[in-house]
Image (cartoon, rainbow, N blue to C red):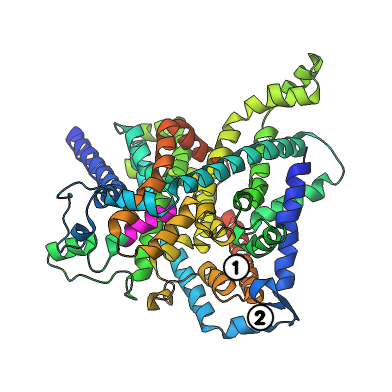
Amino acid sequence: MKTKKLKISRIFIYVILIGGVLIAVFPFLWMILTSLKTNAETMTIPPTILPKKIRFDGYVTVLTKLPFLKIYANTIISSVVTVIAQLVFCAMAGYAYARIDFPFKNILFTATLAVLMVPGTFFILPQYRIINKLGLLNTIYALFLPNLFSAMGTFLLRQFFMSLPQELEDAAYIDGCNRGKAFIKIMLPLVKPGLVSLGILTFRFAWNDLMWPMIVNTSTDKMTLSASLSFMQGQYVTDFPSIMAGALMAAVPMIVLFAIFQKQFIEGVAHTGIKG
Amino acid sequence: MIAPVTLGLIIFYFYPFFRVIIDSFHNIGAFDKDMGFVGLQNYQTMVKDKEMWRALGNTFKYVAIIVPLSLLFALLIAVLLNAKVKALSFFRVVYFLPAITMSVAVSMVWRWIYNGDFGILNGLMTAIGLEPRLWLSDKATALICISTVSIWTNVGYYMIILLAGIQGISKGYYEAAEIDGATGLQKFVKITLPLLTPTIFYVVIMLIISTFQIFSEIYMMIDVKAPAIKFTQSVVMHFYRSAFSYSKKGYASAIAVLLFVIIMLLTVFQMKMQKKWVNYD
């Protein structure tokens, strides 16, 4: 009796989970299927599920009408630079706030925490003006400059450094390490989960962000993927295969990256909940 | 060692912070031209701005729909995945997929699914004998449709965080409960839920902060000139349009200040409330 009841509840669990999988996957499937249809086929009623004939018109439109490779490059460069800079700067500052005493430490740290509390949108107008004053609108630098510095990253890594025992570092000093060497050789490898978390969060943000890249760079060859997709949707309103081809091509790199670094992604996100 | 971050924060965050507050008392027009101090005028405009009030109302609706439902579904899936299911890593990866996909791309495909003329959703409605709808232009459905997209992306992300939280709970509690003959539901209500409250608290705070700034889904799914913008636009969308479509940057700064104050109050309120329900031992 008991095992039967258990079995039914098991089946019930799988039914819900598989239902969820269908909901999670369907939009991706629909993106692919639509991108392979002709424009005329997307406008039939009722809609066809599978393309009658596989066509790549949508991809051709995207690749010929937009400087898509340039846009890919812009997005990759800006995301990678942002991640690297944040990791380096935040690790240094996070370590200093966790382990070194220096003048005005408390005030500076409180100020950094305060930035953490403010929604990102809040800073955009003056940031835009600074970039404009520097003459950097419509350049690749505009895409990442304000994002190189992160209060969140500094705080996150400080938490990771704080959780390491002081003895580890002391032992390194006894062995003749100086502070720089101890930081790089001993401490940094130990906060690797923190670095991975921050790297993934930052990459996801930089890759996705829409408002900032949209306002600073308006010429098509300086845009990021998300901004150019929004531009494209405005231009090719009812050309659904092209729109879906563009969306798919923009989504794929992140999905490939996720497929490769699955474990790191999932652990990285899980860690933010534990340390935050 | 703190020099790069501190310098960067001063230029791109501390200075802008005070600048926005000052600007909110100025009249700033196209090309960032400052036309002088105007006192509280921007704030007075805001109080009288019907669009602003609607945007604020919409934003609260987004929060009221997206936050609880994202949490509920994320928790449900996390709990089910924790029940020793087969192919755990397959499920985790698939559920996480929406969360790592560019939100702009996600919004585009959903807009196409919702399309009033040729969308697959209406195809489905017709197939089962229901009336097709103009999902994204209809006042009754537009905001809910946008919220659905946001929930769809949130669930997998927060599920991962909640699942990690559940797995962090010591097995000893469950073993003790099993000896006492507790059922699955009892174990969930008496053990999992209370011990998970710190993680739930974190998830709720993150969800509120991100939902309050909802922008790209709306921007990508609703045309700025469409009448539907009235009952779908959020505070951040109104901010964006004021600053970059109408070049009223002083006014937009005042909106930014309001946004900040509301998020601050909500967070402080949450922090105060947490003593009542969050378990830290």
Taking A154 as reference, is B61 left or right?
A: left
As measured in the structure, the alpha-carbon distance from the residue carrying label 1 to the one carrying label 2 is 14 Å
| Magenta span | B103-111
Q: Is residue A275 visible?
A: no
Q: Nearer the viewer, residue B168 or A68?
A: A68
Inspect the image, locate mark 1, and give the three-letter code of the amino acid beneath it.
Leu
Inspect the image, locate mark 2, and give the three-letter code of the amino acid beneath it.
Asn
> What kind of secondary structure does the magenta stretch mostly adopt?
helix
Q: Judge the density around disc 2: few (<14), some (14-19), many (≥20) Cα neighbours within 10 Å.
A: many
Taking A81 as reference, is B102 left or right?
A: left
Q: Is residue A157 magenta?
A: no
Residue at 63%, 49% (x, y): give it.
A141
Residue B73, horizontal then vertical, whole percent: 37, 51
Residue at 69%, 21% (x, y): give it.
A185
* Label of residue B259 in the image: 1
C-beta proximity under 8 Å, tags 1 and 2? no
* Label of residue B42 in the image: 2
- Residue A12's place in the image compared with A223, above or below, is above
Q: Label 1, secondary structure: give it.
A: helix
Answer with the quarter of the image where residue B83 lies.
Answer: top left
Q: Residue furthest front?
A: A64
Q: Judge the density around disc 1: few (<14), some (14-19), many (≥20) Cα neighbours within 10 Å.
A: many
Residue B18, horizontal then vertical, whole percent: 75, 65
Q: Quadrant of the N terminus of chain B?
A: top right
For discs 1 and 2, the disc positioned in front in the rendered view: 2
Residue B196, horizontal then vertical, whole percent: 48, 44
- Residue A190's place in the image compared with B2, above or below, is above
Residue at 73%, 26% (x, y): give it.
A183
Answer with the quarter of the image where residue A234 lies.
Answer: bottom left
The subunit carrying tag 1 is B
